[in-house]
Image (cartoon, rainbow, N blue to C red):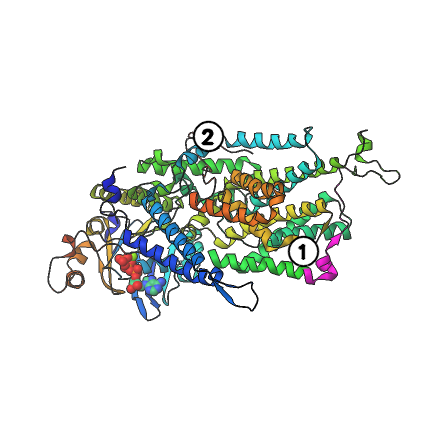
């Protein structure tokens, strides 16, 4: 890079940088004076102790930091879009073999619980991560593809979990019957909630969906005759494998899983079974959204995300397009919620707080909006790492925040922002028919 | 110029705009404008900055609801009163497509995907609300292959087949303008509304654009409404020209008539001066709104 260009006519604007840093320092001064400038002295009497050095250090640090950031940003070529271009190139090359990678991933994960090293904790953790991967993929339809910022996704997760539980307990239906019903109820709920709010855009939509999410939880708490209030509901049965129950002591005349296969009873069998269920559900979510992306409906979602005005000018009905994304996204949350309920054996409203929505959204945004692989990576980072590093539980939020800031600085479009086209002209020779299930 | 150009031809008007007015708080953007446009003709709409040209488009395409007036579109698909219809229905049912003054492609989707989104309505029907699509039924796959062929045909015509799989936002400005027109045409419109398609094009690209618009008129028989600042474009290819100034229509006729209309000369150049023809690079395109 030639220096003339860098420091020439539109080179570093020292004035602006100093002014910017000065402003930041001023804010820091006010905050620092209040936060650590004065302190009640320990020596009784309630006197105030003044600590000028703390303030000076804080202000100087903010000034220098702000100036450094401004300098650094100012000297970067703005045209390059995202930082780390080599990473982008690598991702682009890898995503040419996306299907292969996904097949390998699902296979590897499927073998995981059968390995001798797999213990209960490991399978359980893998299940937890898969739940979030599935939720991330579901929310990806809404946020990543359709571009609707939904901060209340957990509401549909809750609706799914409660619908499942109530159906299973009151009507004594099996898991495989309740699951689609709960998904349908959640989807219906998504459409109903979506209808009034979809006129809103961006931040407004985010706030309103956040409100709906909290409302759902509060209604669940207060409608105790149906939902058991904050106590929740217990005694949700574990699904059976074609009627084989996972229990050490089956009722008379009943064959349990371990008896049928003639193996000793192991608590891990149930966990592995649950793990495979969520794996299949997640796989379905993945296949569905990948397939949808290649269909007119999915392209309409992306078109709407890119430019709503242009979409309307092409005859796309924005309400229908948005509701379909909202409803289908909610459906997968409903499936995940059903699974969550059956895995836990009990549910209560504290599992469906705003922080869950935030985590799922963070998984989608950090992973790279619309990126299926990105969701896997982000779910592993945000769910697995904190669980493994339990000793540092207090730092969990710090880690969270740190990851967010790092991503926003280096990769504002998310970790894996590469978008694979849904169709290529090169792959479609004249007259050839394309398509088929992935 | 096409044989249909003469205003007294027996062909009835396809688009009939009558007494159209549009007020924004305090501002009268359009004031009692009436004009008509025929199929197979290019109707130019010219006027200085802020004359209300884009606002007329926004009323026709349903982005604004006019304060007063009627906009009727008549073709073999039926008769539509556009001032009462929602924007997406005007595009979907009445067959009106448009481009925007500041290009509005889907920047992160590829060029091919842009052209496929424009064929959404028929593809959606073929995919039976995605069910046939999800199952990969031949009915849908054939429709999609056909849609890709339509897109390929347009890219061929524009000489942009190579750019098919590139993100639309990465193309050069002139190419984006062309793609936006192709995208509008992919929706098989009866009326094509182009808002300053030549803005930002160099002379060679402008000449190509003229050719393209004349070809579209010949090959597809659509009616074209053309907002343009570049007099060389409007006067060169329009069959009729409507002139707006401060929201009101001040002239309407063949390019020849309009060029010699004293009211037009006054509006463009003050009391005395050359006809607008010599002012071939008009005021710079505006910004902002659709
Ligand atoms: N949404 C709006 N709200 C308020 N005023 C508007 C709105 N849209 C247009 N106007 C006003 O209407 C007038 C006509 O604007 P319009 O964009 O139609 O002009 P134009 O002829 O397309 O000009 P240009 O050549 O700059 O594109 C302007 O004074 C503009 O400020
Ligand atoms: Mg305009």
Q: Is residue A269 left or right of residue B144?
A: right
Count neighbours of disc 2 (C-alpha within 10 A) and say few if under 14, some if 14 to 19, many if 20 or more: few
Dot 2: what SS? loop
Q: Residue furthest front?
A: A43
Residue A79 image-quadrant placement: top left
Q: Is residue B82 magenta?
A: no
Structural distance between the alpha carbons of marks 2 and 1:
53 Å
| Chain under disc 2 | A
Q: Nearer the viewer, residue A403 or A284?
A: A403
Dot 1: what SS? helix
Q: Quadrant of the C terminus of chain B?
A: bottom left
Mark 1 = which residue? A349
Q: Is residue A317 left or right of residue B54?
A: right
User: Which residue is depicted at the point 57% across and 66% down?
Assistant: A44
- From the image, state whether disc 2 or disc 1 is nearer to you: 1
Q: Position of residue A338 (x, y in %)?
A: 68, 47
Q: Is residue A119 left or right of residue A31?
A: right
Count neighbours of disc 1 (C-alpha within 10 A) and say few if under 14, some if 14 to 19, many if 20 or more: many
Residue B24 image-quadrant placement: bottom left
Report if residue B13 is visible in the image: no
Q: Position of residue A6 (x, y in %)?
A: 26, 42
Question: Residue A432: which numbered mark, if any?
Answer: 2
Q: Which residues are magenta?
A: A221-242
| Chain under disc 1 | A
Please report contact status of discs 2 and 1: CB closer than 8 Å, yes or no. no
Q: Is residue B83 above or below residue B192?
A: below
Residue B204 image-quadrant placement: top left
Q: Position of residue B62 (x, y in %)?
A: 40, 58
Report the image quarter containing ligand 2: bottom left
């Amino acid at each position: 890079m030639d220096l003339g260009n860098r420091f020439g006519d539109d080179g570093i604007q020292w004035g602006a940088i100093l002014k910017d840093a000065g402003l930041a320092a001023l804010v820091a001064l006010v905050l620092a004076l209040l936060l650590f400038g004065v302190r009640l002295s320990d020596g009784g009497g309630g006197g105030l102790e003044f600590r000028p050095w703390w303030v000076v250090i804080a202000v100087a640090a903010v000034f220098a930091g702000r100036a450094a950031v401004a300098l650094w940003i100012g000297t970067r070529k703005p045209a390059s879009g995202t930082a780390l271009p080599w990473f982008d190139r690598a991702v682009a090359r890898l995503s040419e073999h996306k299907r292969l990678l996904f097949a390998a991933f699902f296979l590897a994960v499927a073998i995981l619980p059968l390995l001798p090293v797999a213990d209960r904790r490991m399978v359980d953790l893998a299940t937890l991560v898969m739940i979030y991967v599935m939720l991330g993929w579901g929310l990806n339809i809404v946020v990543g593809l359709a571009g609707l910022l939904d901060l209340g996704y957990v509401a549909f997760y809750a609706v799914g979990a409660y619908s499942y539980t109530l159906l299973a307990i009151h009507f004594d239906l099996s898991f495989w019957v309740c699951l689609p019903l709960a998904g349908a109820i959640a989807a219906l709920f998504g459409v109903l909630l979506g209808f009034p709010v979809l006129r809103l855009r961006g931040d407004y939509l985010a706030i309103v969906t956040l409100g709906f999410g909290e409302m759902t939880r509060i209604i669940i708490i207060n409608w105790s005759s149906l939902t058991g209030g904050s106590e929740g509901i217990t005694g949700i049965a574990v699904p059976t494998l074609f009627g084989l129950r996972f229990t050490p002591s089956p009722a008379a005349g009943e064959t349990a899983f371990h008896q049928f296969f003639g193996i000793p009873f192991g608590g891990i069998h149930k966990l592995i079974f649950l793990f495979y269920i969520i794996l299949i559900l997640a796989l379905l979510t993945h296949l569905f959204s990948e397939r949808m992306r290649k269909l007119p409906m999915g392209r309409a979602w992306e078109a709407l995300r890119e430019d709503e005005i242009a979409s309307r000018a092409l005859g796309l009905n924005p309400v229908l397009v948005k509701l379909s994304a909202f409803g289908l996204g909610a459906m997968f949350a409903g499936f995940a919620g059903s699974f969550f309920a059956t895995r836990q054996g009990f549910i209560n409203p504290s599992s469906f707080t705003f922080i869950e929505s935030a985590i799922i959204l963070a998984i989608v945004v950090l992973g790279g909006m619309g990126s299926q692989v990105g969701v896997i990576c982000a779910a592993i980072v945000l769910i697995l790492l904190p669980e493994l590093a339990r000793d540092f539980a207090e730092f969990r939020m710090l880690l969270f925040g740190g990851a967010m800031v790092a991503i926003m600085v280096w990769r504002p479009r998310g970790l894996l922002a590469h978008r694979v086209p849904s169709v290529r002209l090169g792959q479609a020779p004249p007259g050839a028919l394309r398509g088929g299930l992935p | 110029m096409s044989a249909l150009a003469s205003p007294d031809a027996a062909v009835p008007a396809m688009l009939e705009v009558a007494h159209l007015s549009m007020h924004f708080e305090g501002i009268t953007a359009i004031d009692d404008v009436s004009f008509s446009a025929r199929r197979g003709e290019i109707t130019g709409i010219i006027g200085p900055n802020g004359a209300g040209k884009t606002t007329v488009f926004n009323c026709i395409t349903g982005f604004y609801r006019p304060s007063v007036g009627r906009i009727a579109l008549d073709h073999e698909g039926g008769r539509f009163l556009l001032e009462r219809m929602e924007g997406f229905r005007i595009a979907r049912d009445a067959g009106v497509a448009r481009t925007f003054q500041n290009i509005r492609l889907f920047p992160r989707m590829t060029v091919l995907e842009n052209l496929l989104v424009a064929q959404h309505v028929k593809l959606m029907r073929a995919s039976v609300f995605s069910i046939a699509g999800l199952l990969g039924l031949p009915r849908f796959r054939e429709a999609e292959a056909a849609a890709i062929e339509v897109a390929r045909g347009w890219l061929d015509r524009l000489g942009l087949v190579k750019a098919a799989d590139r993100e639309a936002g990465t193309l050069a400005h002139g190419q984006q303008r062309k793609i936006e027109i192709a995208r509008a045409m992919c929706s098989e419109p009866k009326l094509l509304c182009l808002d300053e398609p030549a803005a930002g094009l160099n002379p060679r690209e402008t000449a190509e654009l003229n050719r393209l618009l004349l070809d579209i008129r010949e090959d597809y028989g659509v009616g074209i409404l053309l907002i343009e600042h570049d007099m060389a474009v409007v006067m060169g290819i329009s069959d009729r020209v409507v002139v707006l100034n401060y929201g009101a229509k001040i002239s309407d006729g063949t390019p020849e008539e309009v060029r010699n209309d004293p009211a037009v000369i006054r509006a463009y150049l003050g009391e005395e001066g050359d006809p607008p023809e010599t002012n071939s690079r008009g005021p710079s395109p505006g910004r902002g709104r659709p």
